[in-house]
């Protein structure tokens, strides 16, 4: 394994409903020198949601959160930990009051972030002749740990989990914790250049060999029967 | 923010109790061209634990896990989710049966991973005249999500959390989810080059501006009064 580069994609304008994220990212990619075989593109959920019109104006954010939530796991003051329609567990069921078009607006998660990723991938393949793996990322809090990390809520053209079962460790003994959430690590790595406040909604990860395939970010969701923290 | 490079540090030999991890990593760094100001070094817990003699032979792994655990949160079959002495919540209280010196051996977490990171940092500063930020990483499972990601269990020379409270988003409105667990994202990014099976226990992250300071990975632990999933 050689070195990995995380390349910020700069100059992407403010995204509005109806915009083609793939085209806007494509322009940024062209400025960055284009795509290479094996590249992974990470795009922030906020621009995907905006382009898909998943914004709304409300004077009752809690009402929107409870409508977006398939189930509420915990509430403390105005913190709501909820399951989204996709099965993700996160604060406010993914409803975001920052990064919106203005005061009183909220941003909702895309209905099908895998499909959003696939559309971006198709546009880029059409333009560059190379189809990158695409990750749609969002900042999630975690149980037991402070701070958010970016994780994958949508993927296209890659397996989100790297399954090393059957692989040996360096000493020749079978590995134990052997399923790695590489899509989440890629999203977190991209966050390091995208930042939170900067208007930098996309980054390229170059040099990481993803496992190609028809993956879905739903594979990252713990199935209910294995969920020890309902 | 420019691009970030994640550089694998190759050729580190099998680590044994009493070895100086800082010296071994220093040799690998020298082969990779040395340190630059602002570099973050990520070192896998397994080599730190081995060097510190945190290995033991047992025919009853569960007994070791329960001894290492400060509290057990959940059990299902042979999966034990437990609090470690440091306050981390993870599988098997961090006791690892792979990456060990041999059959019947287990690897335990360092008693004070921040101190482990600080020792490595001191050795490297002595040798190169530059003190990198150091992260000791381990692979943790997560509630609600499949697969492990690498997170920070020890840090030195950096703040593990990036606190953006008081910062505005690109549209000039206050950010919401504003504390980012950058040490965990750095650990996860490094995992992408270190892999699990490869004998590659360290990587350098170059180009990410950490917030310098006397940080501790314990800042990443959710305090009990804010823990919604006890």
Image (cartoon, coloured by chain):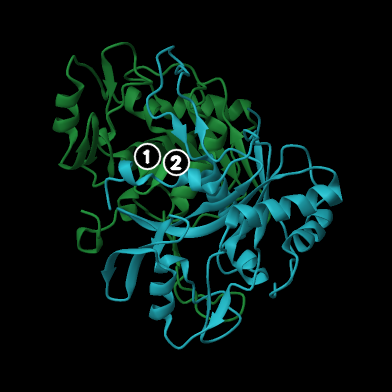
Chain colours: A green, B cyan
Identify the residue at image location x=72%, y=37%: B38
Q: Which of the 4 quarters of the picture holds residue B20?
A: bottom right
Q: Which mark is residue B68?
A: none
The local crowd at label 1, few if under 14, some if 14 to 19, many if 20 or more residues have their Cα within 10 Å, is many
Q: Is residue A131 visible?
A: no
Along the line of sight, the residue nearer the viewer: B190 or A3 = B190
The local crowd at label 2, few if under 14, some if 14 to 19, many if 20 or more residues have their Cα within 10 Å, is many
Disc 1 versus disc 2: distance between alpha carbons?
6 Å
Along the line of sight, the residue nearer the viewer: A230 or A169 = A230
Where does label 1 land, which residue?
Answer: A140
Is the same chain shared between marks 1 and 2? yes
Horizontally, is B48 left or right of A165 in the view?
right
Label 1 close to label 2 by CB (< 8 Å): yes
Horizontally, is B74 left or right of B4 in the view?
left
Compared with residue A104, is residue A173 higher up or lower down, i.e. above or below?
A: below
Q: Is residue B62 visible?
A: yes
Chain hosting mark 1:
A
Horizontally, is B226 left or right of B39 in the view?
left
Chain hosting mark 2:
A
Identify the residue at image location x=44%, y=18%: B169
Q: Position of residue A177 (x, y in %)?
A: 45, 68
Q: Position of residue B172 (x, y in %)?
A: 44, 11
Q: Position of residue A64 (x, y in %)?
A: 17, 26
Identify the residue at image location x=64%, y=64%: B48
Q: Which of the 4 quarters of the picture holds residue A86?
A: top left
Along the line of sight, the residue nearer the viewer: A168 or B85 = B85
Where does label 2 land, which residue?
Answer: A149
Identify the residue at image location x=39%, y=64%: B70
Along the line of sight, the residue nearer the viewer: B118 or A35 = B118
In the rendered structure, which disc, 1 or 2, sits on the residue that comes first in sequence? 1
């Amino acid at each position: 394994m050689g070195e990995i580069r995380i390349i910020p994609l700069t100059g992407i304008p403010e995204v509005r409903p109806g915009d083609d994220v793939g085209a806007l990212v494509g322009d940024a990619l062209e400025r960055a020198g284009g795509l290479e075989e094996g590249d992974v593109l990470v795009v922030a959920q906020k621009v995907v949601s905006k382009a898909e019109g998943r914004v709304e104006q409300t004077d009752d954010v809690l009402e929107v959160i409870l409508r977006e939530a398939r189930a509420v796991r915990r509430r403390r003051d105005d913190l709501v930990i909820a399951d989204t329609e996709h099965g993700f567990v996160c604060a406010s069921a993914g409803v975001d009051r920052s990064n919106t078009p203005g005061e009183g607006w909220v941003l909702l998660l895309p209905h099908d972030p895998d499909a959003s990723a696939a559309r971006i991938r198709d546009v880029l393949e059409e333009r560059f002749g190379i189809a990158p793996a695409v990750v749609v990322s969002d900042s999630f809090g975690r149980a037991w740990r402070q701070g958010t990390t970016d994780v994958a809520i949508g993927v296209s053209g890659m397996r989100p989990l790297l399954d090393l079962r059957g692989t040996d460790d360096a000493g020749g003994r079978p590995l134990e914790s052997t399923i790695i959430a590489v899509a989440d690590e890629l999203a977190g790595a991209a966050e390091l250049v995208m930042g939170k406040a900067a208007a930098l909604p996309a980054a390229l990860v170059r040099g990481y060999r993803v496992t190609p395939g028809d993956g879905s970010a739903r594979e990252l969701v713990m199935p209910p029967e294995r969920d020890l923290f309902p």
